[in-house]
Image (spheres, rainbow, N blue to C red):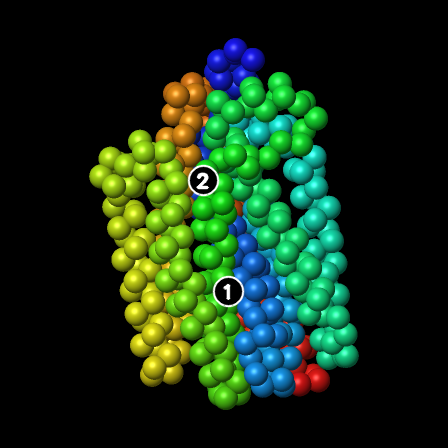
Amino acid sequence: MTMMPTNLIPSVDPNPLPAPYWLLKLLLIVTFVLHILAMNFLLGGGVMALLTKWRVKDRGTSTRLFFDIANKMPVLLPAAITLGIAPLLFVQVLYGQFLYTSSILMAWPWFLVLVLLTVAYYGFYYVSYRSGRNPGRAGVVMLFSVILVFLIGFLFTNNITLSQAPARWGAKYFASAGGWHLNLGDSTLIPRYLHFFVAAVAVGGLLLVFMALASWKRDREYAGRLLAFGGRTFMLATMAQFVVGIVFLVSQPPALRMLFMGGNLLATVLLLVGITGAIAAVYLMSDALHRENIRVAAFYVPAIIGVVIACMSVMRDILRNSYLEPYFHPGQFAVKTQWSVLPLFLALFAGGVILWFVMLWRYGLFGGGKAAGAGTADS
């Protein structure tokens, strides 16, 4: 019980890194951005589908929109999983001794993630299958699957925050070694989780904007409703994110909080860029809705939000390193760059990302193609 946290942290993997530390860190951030985009489309899309049941008064439009979104969920879930594998692997390479320990402390909830994913996947497939047929209990099943995905996100947030708090490991483990520990006592847990949740709702609004873009020439009336509903949801969620972001910042320990308030130049600049970008995105979306300018709403606003998400991802990495600063030192890694395979890996990585976006577009993720058309049969 009196052991120091450093004695509870496993030793660094003696195998040398296969690439320079800075490159692995860059790939971690890039792949995390791709993963979080897919995850936000998944979570936000599920929320938007449910909101159509309560907010869209026209029953025909509500049913059509619900199933247009529902048909995309079985695509978005595996996309989020696939794009999440890479950042998880990079985290294991660089921060393995922290992530493995926190995963052991919450072993059973961590194993439960696979079960929850499987059940949610089946639920999304069921709802998609009901499109063009009697909807049945599609709304209830959608709600259940979305709740499961949000629960998965909550478990991930527990694991990440616990991995950054080695000082809590000893008390938890010696109190019980059964593997049922969460990080519920962390004051940053709920604000961090809400920070991701609200961002997902905002990106879910952008999903409807993309769908409006795909339908703009074919069905202008329907596309206009998508644009208005998605754009307003995006603006409301983004404005709510300012409040959640402030709460998240205030919940941090004072020393870490000051990193983003002048203590660290990069972190401060990124925070200012993120705030400015979010304000600009809300203003442009408002103007686009007023003018029904689909080009601004579907191109300029998402581009700005992409920059904001990239800034937030780098800030997240700075915060993690600050939490682990007493225990984590990049200089402790041995590096043996595998030049024979590294260029091939980078080329395949870039090609795979491009192919992934092409596949999603041709499949009809944003409103065109086979997936989108299936949900309109009974509307």
Which residue is drawn at the image coordinates 43% and 43% (left, top)? 29
Q: Which residue is mark 1?
A: 204
x and y, in percent, of residue 159 in the image = 56, 36
Amino acid carrying mark 1 in the image = Gly
Position above or below: 338 against 75: above
Amino acid carrying mark 2 in the image = Thr
Left or right, 86 with respect to 272, comes to right
Towards the viewer: 296 or 261: 261
Q: Secondary structure at mark 2?
A: loop
Position above or below: 59 against 194: below
Is the residue marked by circle 1 packed among few (<14), some (14-19), or many (20+) residues within 10 Å? many
Towards the viewer: 185 or 340: 185
Q: Which residue is mark 2?
A: 188
Residue 201 visible in this rendered orientation of the protein: yes
Position above or below: 330 against 261: above
Q: Secondary structure at mark 1?
A: helix
Q: Which mark is in front, 2 or 1?
A: 2
